[in-house]
Image (cartoon, rainbow, N blue to C red):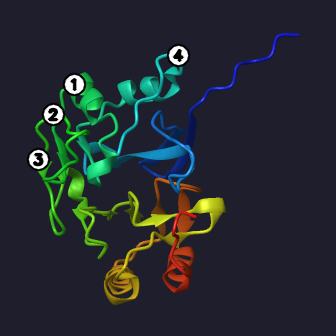
């Protein structure tokens, strides 16, 4: 009996014009505080198509590439300095501009000339960069057409429970900054690590939970 080979990439529909793909990060190691499978996001908004923190699937897993090639991205976005991932691959393959922080780690600098974004920046498609209070140069994104927030590391979901990643100023700065985002009419959040999609109620509950330490 021949068994069908399962794809190492999961594709999940989230909302109209919004889907994610998930696969194992090639640089994952035990003890880093996050699970090996990470999430990348595709969003279509106002005739623009953006990939957020994109990690390239392997060549023998064509499902994501076929879907992207059918509706090519028009921009790529890095949400955090250590989420460079494969932005160069996507920028080169589709000949598109890329956006991201102005600072990067010296061992992980993109070759693509990324356009600098900061909290308050508006990206193609009307996406808006936000402030998460953690001072890690992360810019979560507000997707107004899909009523969705997308985070890199500010929130994580180990074991499926949404948590804020710890800092030394969690209560003083981070929780107030994230609580202020409740002013936006979002219905869901997407996070890179752990279970990727959560409701607004999950987000509200996470503000009152102990932060995630990675232990």
Residue drawn at x 33%, y 47% as measured from the top left: 83
Q: CA distance from mark 4 to mark 1?
A: 19 Å
Q: CA distance from mark 2 to mark 4?
A: 25 Å
Q: Nearer the viewer, residue 137 or 213?
A: 213
For the question of whether residue 44 can be seen, the reply is yes
Q: Earlier in the sequence, mark 2 or mark 1?
A: 1
Q: Earlier in the sequence, mark 4 or mark 1?
A: 4
Q: Nearer the viewer, mark 2 or mark 1?
A: 2
Q: Are marks 2 and 1 in contact (CB under 8 Å)?
A: yes
Q: Earlier in the sequence, mark 3 or mark 4?
A: 4
Q: Which residue is mark 2?
A: 112
Q: Are marks 3 and 1 in contact (CB under 8 Å)?
A: no
Report the quarter where the C terminus lies: bottom right
Residue drawn at x 55%, y 52% as measured from the top left: 31
Q: Which residue is mark 3?
A: 115
Q: Nearer the viewer, residue 33 or 68?
A: 33
Q: Secondary structure at mark 3?
A: strand
Q: Which residue is mark 4?
A: 60
Q: Which residue is mark 1?
A: 92
Q: Are marks 4 and 1 in contact (CB under 8 Å)?
A: no
């Amino acid at each position: 009996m021949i068994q069908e080979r399962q794809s190492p990439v999961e594709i999940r529909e989230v909302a109209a014009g919004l889907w994610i793909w998930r696969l194992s990060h090639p640089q994952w190691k035990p003890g880093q505080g996050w699970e090996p499978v990470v999430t990348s996001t595709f969003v279509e908004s106002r005739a623009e198509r953006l990939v957020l923190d994109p990690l390239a699937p392997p060549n023998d897993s064509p499902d994501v590439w076929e879907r992207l090639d059918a509706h090519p991205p028009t921009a790529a976005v890095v949400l955090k300095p250590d989420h460079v991932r494969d932005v160069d691959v996507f920028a080169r393959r589709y000949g598109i501009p890329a956006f991201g922080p102005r600072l990067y780690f010296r061992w992980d600098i993109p070759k693509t000339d990324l356009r600098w974004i900061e909290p308050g920046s508006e990206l193609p498609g009307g996406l808006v960069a936000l402030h998460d209070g953690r001072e890690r140069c992360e810019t979560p994104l507000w997707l107004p057409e899909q009523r969705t927030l997308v985070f890199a590391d500010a929130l994580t979901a180990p074991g499926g429970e949404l948590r804020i990643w710890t800092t030394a100023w969690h209560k003083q700065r981070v929780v107030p900054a994230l609580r202020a985002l409740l002013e936006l009419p979002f219905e869901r959040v997407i996070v890179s690590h752990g279970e990727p999609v959560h409701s607004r109620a999950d987000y509200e509950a996470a503000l009152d939970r102990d932060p995630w330490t990675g232990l």
